[in-house]
Amino acid sequence: METSSTVAAETSAAEESVEGVSLTVTFDGDTCMYDGPTELPPGEVTVTLINDSNKTTDAEMAKLQDGVTYEDVTAFHSPEPHEGARPEEDLVEPLEFDQAHAWPGDDGSTTGVVTTGEYVLVCLQVGSANALVWVARPSGVSVTE
């Protein structure tokens, strides 16, 4: 027999899985900053970009290739901004979900599903030839069971 506390607990768990986790990245034109949890469970994630710069900017959450660390990605992209494509394919896997896009002074969000592994958040400004890439500081995100 279900009690009201059992139903409430099941409802709470369902709300958490439906709502997922929300992460925020802030870009000021010089620095890409992430101020959030460093560990997450697998599942739905919403990445919100706060664009405090004067240029259109994107943000993405990219899964690192096996054996690649957050420090490897930051070293490759130093000095910032790194000019080139999004983080190199030998460092990160293909995107699991769309980039968040924000006009200057605006916010943008994207939602997707993350699986077990290590992730990095980056800010990008896409130009005609190459993107400018900033790695979100101070750390990446581990997705664990």
Image (cartoon, helix red, strand yellow):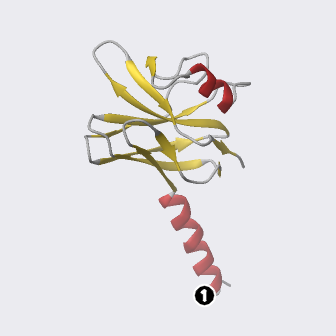
Q: Is residue 43 visible?
A: yes
Image location (x, y in percent) of residue 80: 49, 26
- Side of 99 where 105 appears, left or right: left
Q: Please give left or right for residue 46 compared with residue 56 in the image.
A: right
- Mark 1 Cα shell of 10 Å, populated few (<14), some (14-19), many (≥20): few
The one of 90 and 81 positioned closer to us in this rendering: 81
**Residue found 52% across the figure and 47% down from its top:** 34
Disc 1 is placed on an element classified as helix
Q: Is residue 46 above or below residue 4?
A: above
Residue in view at x 56 percent, y 22 percent: 78
Q: Locate the N terminus and report the quarter of the image it occupies.
A: bottom right
Q: Residue at x 52, y 43 (%)?
A: 113
Q: Which residue is mark 1?
A: 4
Q: How many marks?
A: 1
On the image, the x and y values in percent for residue 15 come to 51, 67
Task: Name the residue nearer the viewer: 27 or 66.
Answer: 27
- The front one of 81 and 63 is 81
Residue 92 picture quarter: top right
